[in-house]
Amino acid sequence: MRNPAAPWTPEEWEALEERTRRRALQADNDAGAWRVVASAARGVLRSFSTSFFIVTRFLPPVKRAKVEAIYAAVRYPDEVVDSFRLPDGERMRRLDAWAAQYEAALEMPSLQTALEGGVPCFVAGFAQVVREAGIPAAYYRAFLDAMRQDLNPRRFVSLDDLIDSYIYGSAIVVGYFLTYVYGPAKPGDFDRALASARNLGIALQLTNFLRDVAEDQRRGRLYLPLDLLRREGVEEADATDPRQHAALNRVLQNLTGLAEDFYVAALADLDAFAPDSRTAIHACMDVYRQLNAQIAGSPRGILHRESVPMARKFKVLPTSKYWRLPLAYLTP
């Protein structure tokens, strides 16, 4: 996950929290409060991720609202570590406070009870999804641990180390959240759906890493495995050093190929998901496979941040359902 062109400030997040809490507590019941929180989460998704917002329009409304709640619950901690202009100690304090509120929300009997107890709206909404969908509570703890790791970054000796030590928490468990919401085609397919989600999470995260090498370096982070760098003669990677560009581009070529293998593996088990979720999942794969291929074939080098033009994103979507997109953008 990465920031939009103009990230929200902590004050903007706090204002959204205040508005959403007030409206949710004014609702007549938990169902009304859920609609308020889900609507606010939809606004977060629409503001931060054009690609994911578009593909989620092809989910059934009940599943779509839960996915939007999941997105908001992972977006805020990601912004804390990536965008908030705060000392690292304050960022860590905010993550720890958010984690404590998650644990509190899990013990609450309802959404409105959690809000009345001071739990942040997007934590309370996500905890409700966890309870209703049966998502293991430990998955979100792993996600927050990965966010903490971004404040104390380390190097990864191999791709397996990167996957096990970081991508598991930053991306794989998010795929698991979504799998519990999407559901399997039939009960016996659930393990295959989880395997597909794991492969897709790895692929998506690798693509994001490869797009943002220079940006991550500015934050003191390196997600390129050390063994692949050393194979190309790079002991200390520096994306700003022209002498390293050829070697780093070969590393990117290698990793885009590995990412494509994970996309292919994820696609092979797409049929394990419930039919009403497959269009959105397939569209997500297609959009990011385009980005991955664009990075692999880019002549502009490691310092250029690639993106898929909107027109090409639309080409991967089912034309029979285009009508949903303008409606989604026009609805407050």
Image (tube, grey):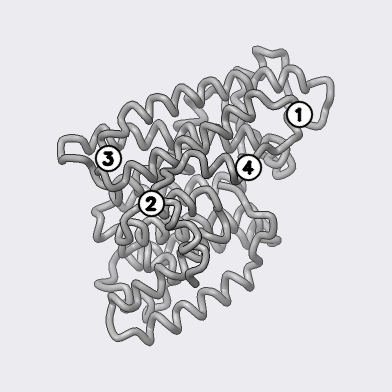
At 52% from the left edge and 36% from the top edge, which residue is drawn?
Answer: 288
Residue at the spot of label 2: 58
View extreme (left): residue: 187
Residue at the spot of label 4: 309
Residue at the spot of label 3: 273
Q: Which of marks 3 and 2 is nearer the N terminus?
A: 2
Q: Which of marks 4 and 2 is nearer the N terminus?
A: 2
Q: On the rendered structure, is 240 left or right of 94?
A: right
Residue at the spot of label 1: 300
Q: On the rendered structure, is 269 left or right of 331?
A: left
At 32% from the left edge and 78% from the top edge, which residue is drawn?
Answer: 32
Question: Badge 1: few (under 14), some or many (20 or more) residues near its Cα, within 10 Å?
Answer: few
Callouts 3 and 2 close, C-beta under 8 Å: no
Q: Where is residue 111 in the image (x, y as percent from the top left)?
A: 32, 73
In this picture, is 57 found above or below 190?
below
In this picture, is 263 found above or below 122?
above
Question: In 3D space, how far apart are the residues under numbered discs 4 and 1 (Cα atoms)?
Answer: 16 Å
At 28% from the left edge and 47% from the top edge, which residue is drawn?
Answer: 276
Q: Earlier in the sequence, mark 2 or mark 1?
A: 2
Question: In 3D space, how far apart are the residues under numbered discs 4 and 2 (Cα atoms)?
Answer: 20 Å
Report the amino acid beneath label 2: Phe
At 67% from the left edge and 37% from the top edge, which residue is drawn?
Answer: 306
Report the amino acid beneath label 4: Pro
Question: In 3D space, how far apart are the residues under numbered discs 3 and 2 (Cα atoms)?
Answer: 14 Å
